Each structure stands twice: as C-alpha cells, then as structure tokens.
Image: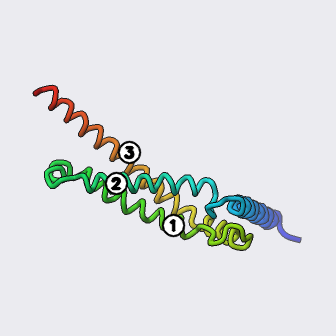
Amino acid sequence: MLPPLDALSVAAAVVQFVDFGAEIISAAKEICDSAEGATQRNSTLKISVIDMEDLSKRLKTSSSDVQVQHYPSLFRLAETSEKLSGKLIDLLKKIEAKNPTSRGHAFIAAIKAKLEDGKMKGLQERLDECRKQIGLELQSLTRCAMIFSLSN
C-alpha cells in the first residue's frame, strides 16, 4: 500500500495525463475536420500574423532614407516585427498536419502543437508588444504631421 502523499501524487499524475490526452484528441479531431490542417485558433493566428508581416514589409519599403533618419525606432520595430512574424509563420507551418484528412497526421500535428505551445505563445506575445509599439509610433508620427500641417 502506498503512503497517502505518494497515492495523491500518482492520482494527480493520472489526472494530468488524462487531461493532456483529452486535449490532444480534441485538437486532432479539430485538425481532421479543418481544411487547413490546423486548429481554428492556429489558422486564425496564421492569417493575423501574415497580415502583420505584410504591414511590417510595407513600413520598411515605404521608408525613405529621410524617414529612417528621423524615425529609426519605427524602422527597427518594422524589422523586428517582420522577423517575429516570419518565425511564428514558420512555427505554425511546422505544426500543421501534412495530410489533414489522415487521423495519424492530425494526431501528430496536435502533439506538435501542444509541445510548441509555449514557444508559440512567447513569439505571439513579443509580436503583440511590437504591434502596440508600432501603433504608438504611427500615432506620434501622425500627430506630428497634423501639427506641422496646421502650423503652415
């Protein structure tokens, strides 16, 4: 017979394992039912990140040398955002099911997604912070442009 604390830790481990298994099975079913080979959350995230990557590229290409000189932080934020977006898109592609109709591929994709969840959340948080900073920079730039145009 196990001591009470050992029995409790075994029971907790079993509950955790069952919860983990249920999450994997649920995600695998969602992947199987999707056309993209990913969960709805990851598909939506991928679209959002692609949009952010496009915005970052436009900010970089529309920046002339004069703008880069006067607004270096906006240019750096656009570069950082583009890099983070690329990393997140690569990660999302890596965890997609190669053949979403295959239960085995969907199951493997669900396990990969669960294992990469922490990394994905970290990249997502960094990208969100970058997005907020870009918004502030653009607000400041717009405000300065409005003040300049009103003063002339």
Alpha carbons under labels 1 and 3: distance apart: 22 Å
Q: What element does badge 1 sit on?
A: helix
The reply to whether residue 20 is in sight is: no
14 or 69, nearer to the observer: 69
Q: Amino acid at mark 2?
A: Ser
Q: Residue, x 42% and y 64% (percent of image)?
A: 86
- In the foreground, 55 or 144: 55
**Left or right placement of residue 104 versus residue 56 in this view:** right
Does residue 94 sit above or below 60 in this rendering?
A: below
Q: What amino acid does circle 3 point to?
A: Lys
Circles 2 and 3: CB atoms closer than 8 Å:
no
- Provide residue 132's location: percent of width, then percent of height: 38, 45
Amino acid beneath label 1? Leu
| Above or below: residue 127 compared with residue 150 | below
What residue does disc 3 label? Answer: 132
Q: Quadrant of the N terminus?
A: bottom right
Q: Spatial distance from mark 2 to mark 3, Cα to Cα?
A: 13 Å
Residue 56's mark? 2
Distance from disc 2 to disc 1, alpha carbons, whole Å, reads: 19 Å
Mark carried by residue 30: none
Q: Quadrant of the C terminus?
A: top left
Q: Nearer the viewer, mark 2 or mark 3?
A: 2
